[in-house]
Image (tube, grey):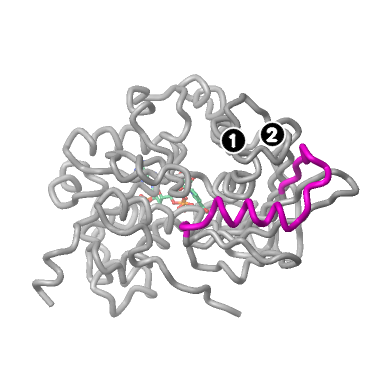
Amino acid sequence: MAAEQKKKFTVGLVGVTGYTGMELARLLSVHPAMRLVRVTSRKEEKRKLGGLHPFLRGFACGELVISPPDPEDLASACELVFLAVPHGTAMTLGADLLRRGCKVVDLSADFRLREASVYESWYGTGHKAPELLVEAVYGLPELYGPRIAAARLTANPGCYPTASILGIYPALQRNLVEEDGLIIDAKSGVSGAGRELKPGSLFCEISGGFKAYSPVVHRHTPEIEQELSSIAAKKLAVTFTPHLLPVNRGILATIYASLKDKRLTLEQALEVYSEVYAGHPFVRVLPAGELPEMRNVRGTMFCDIGVVVDQRAGRLLLVACIDNLCRGASGQAVANANLMLGLELGTGLFMPALTP
Ligand SMILES: NC(=O)c1ccc[n+]([C@@H]2O[C@H](COP(=O)([O-])OP(=O)(O)OC[C@H]3O[C@@H](n4cnc5c(N)ncnc54)[C@H](OP(=O)(O)O)[C@@H]3O)[C@@H](O)[C@H]2O)c1
């Protein structure tokens, strides 16, 4: 047992009190090749992790004592650190950890946008480590796997962008649809807003309701546009409208695109999707007539994609579904860390959904 533990990579987690931090701790508690050796919080330091999060009692990491987020201590103990913190915080912490020789997977938006000016205009604050934006690799393994494997710094994608980009990627890459006029209509569970207390996340504000929010101005828009423009080799703009669903976890994005060839059949579209995602075990292209459901991806790394051809209106419809906390954040972060540490992408991540 001791010899087996020695072979594991040591990893740290900044932000263990938040939702993505909790999900990271859950995944890392049973990871066969990584050992969580540091967990941090500014509010809960000195507590045992299993005391803060009782779902971790009985696991080795449940015995860890929570420490403050000190880069020197993290770098001395860890080969790789996950930053599960708000944007604005990760850029300084990430730069500090990299300087001290740690690899970093950042779950925030701080390193996702390649241009500091775009970051500044959407996030309303200057970037404090713009030199790292060129180095950071966008952590979507289906698009950037080999580059992630060679990276010191991975910018884990946002939850909505993960579902949206994976949903439209084959259609854009294989020229099935017009680059202009893409519409992304997406719904997320409430954990997408984080664990910080705010009236808009209270049970009575959410339960039994359903609403759109931040159309046109949501901060995931430039990230989606950056990646889709790169796939299409053309600068494009999308119309992205997020909605808040009264569920804990899950994102379902319905994407509307105009067909280039209005005679495209469902069989042809499905063939393209299956070809593009062959060899990518965490994307499941559903058979004709089937559509994704959140319950089938809950707690997993899977992105389920349903394809519909509307020949009458000349449109391709893609329905992409993920778990925002697992595939849309922490599971994807672990997958990226796997690659960065020389492990198989799916190490510790290949599991079916908890259902019903
Ligand atoms: N929720 C999602 O579905 C989702 C999906 C994809 C990406 N993300 C991104 O992932 C990051 C974390 O999201 P979340 O939903 O887990 O947020 P959250 O629930 O609000 O948790 C934020 C965490 O960051 C820590 N933190 C805050 N300020 C800090 C600072 N200055 N220094 C060190 N630690 C600090 C907090 O710990 P203490 O206050 O205890 O120190 C807390 O553990 C965000 O950037 C978010 O945009 C979230």
Relative to 119, does residue 86 appear above or below in the rendering?
below
Find the distance from the CA under tag 1 to the CA under tag 2: 9 Å
Q: Nearer the viewer, residue 291 or 176?
A: 176
Judged from the image, the secondary structure of the residue bearing numbered disc 2 is: strand
108 left or right of 149?
right
Q: Which residues are magenta?
A: 255-280
Discs 1, 2 touching: Cβ within 8 Å? yes
> Who's the residue at 37% across and 66% down the image?
27
Residue position for label 2: 238
Instruction: Judge whether residue 27 can be spotted in this image.
Output: yes
Figure quadrant of residue 8: bottom left
Residue 179 coordinates in the image, percent (x, y): 69, 32
346 left or right of 199?
left
Residue 176 coordinates in the image, percent (x, y): 70, 41
Residue 334 coordinates in the image, percent (x, y): 36, 56
Is residue 260 within the magenta segment? Answer: yes
Q: Nearer the viewer, residue 356 or 234?
A: 234
Residue position for label 1: 228
> Who's the residue at 32% across and 64% down the image?
28
253 left or right of 338?
right
